[in-house]
Image (cartoon, rainbow, N blue to C red):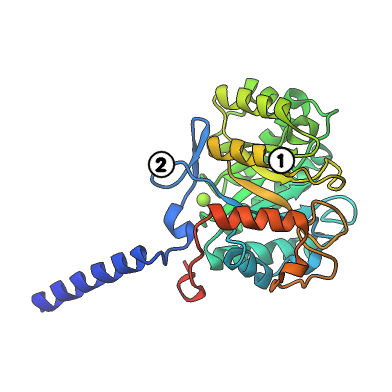
Amino acid sequence: MRANCKIALVLSVCLASASMSYGQQTVVAKHGQLSVEGNRIVDKDGNPVVLRGMSLFWSQWMPQYYNAEAVEWLRDDWRCTVVRASMAVESGGYLSNPEREKRKIDTVVQAAIDLGIYVIIDWHDHNAHKHIEQARAFFEEMAKKYGKHPNVIYELWNEPLNSHDWSTVIKPYHEAVIPGIRAHDPDNLIACGSSTWSQDVDKASRDPLKFDNVAYTLHFYAATHRQSLRTKATTALNNGVALIVTEWGTSEASGSGKLDAEETRRWLDFMDRNHLSWCNWSVADKRETSAALMPRASGTGNWTAENISPSGTLVRKELRAKNPPPTTAAASRN
Ligand code: MG
């Protein structure tokens, strides 16, 4: 019996290391629970981790991409290690159709958990300070349901406006919502937006939130936002806070206009140098520069070169160059 046990043990150790050496681990199996250490997001072993992936478009306007097949295609063909589910709040979103919009988020979150990638639950709102109670209840429910999974990152307020003050409006909102999450999930990462469409990370870093595992959201659109925004980001990092780029575009701030490949390169280099995780805006087939897909691209992946826009082509190339190859579907359940 003892000898058999020994053989079984040796065998299982060999199998485990063989599967690891063949890269059969999902990204979440590899990095596990994320946390914030100083100005870095680190993995379960304390090493800096950089996630790169795609943001889905406003959930009420692009529902066709909120399904497991699209998420699987984004993992396998685009090599996304993270996806962002952008739950619309106003404009026909969660406030008027809570169950319908929440179902889309549940679908994408469950798919990401099954596929072993990270997922951002984004309260896609410009006026979240007017919806504190709804946001708190929503995130409490999400934390209760998904807080035990290391896959999940909570993004509390996509983009406050430039008129919203950090210290008196935005910070108090985060302070009202975070305890609801922490009651059920003591540790998963929380991304917090700042004023001027989540660009004033320098202001947030001077008056930071007093919670663990909080990162500040940095958003940019390469044809509009340039070195002055990178300087603000550097100031925030130097002040000791962690940043996460939950949304960025190759286009102008409107989401359309010029595709600035040169400035996009500067931003990608900046994010690499500073170990910043990112999601590109967006998985959409809308006729606008930042949309990654061409009109009428399938809702469930299998996108050919003709289905992918110039922006999508640039971003997919970057993802495939920088992210590790995905695991096989059979090995992906974690
Ligand atoms: Mg947790």
> Which residue is tagged 2?
46
Q: CA distance from mark 2 to mark 1?
A: 33 Å
Mark in front: 2 vs 1: 1
Residue sitting at 57 percent across and 45 percent down?
Answer: 183
Quadrant in the rendering for residue 104: bottom right
> Which residue sits furthest right?
91
Q: In the rendering, at what x and y percent does residue 244 appear?
A: 62, 40
Q: Nearer the viewer, residue 301 or 222?
A: 222
Which sits in the foreground, 313 or 45?
A: 313
Q: Residue at x 44, y 59 (%)?
A: 29
**Label 1 residue SS:** helix
- The reply to whether residue 58 is in sight is yes
Beta carbon of the mark 2 residue lies under 8 A of ligand 1: no
Q: Which residue is mark 1?
A: 262
Q: Amino acid at mark 2?
A: Gly
Q: Looking at the figure, which quarter contains the N terminus?
A: bottom left
Measuring from the top left, give residue 301's x and y in whole percent: 70, 71
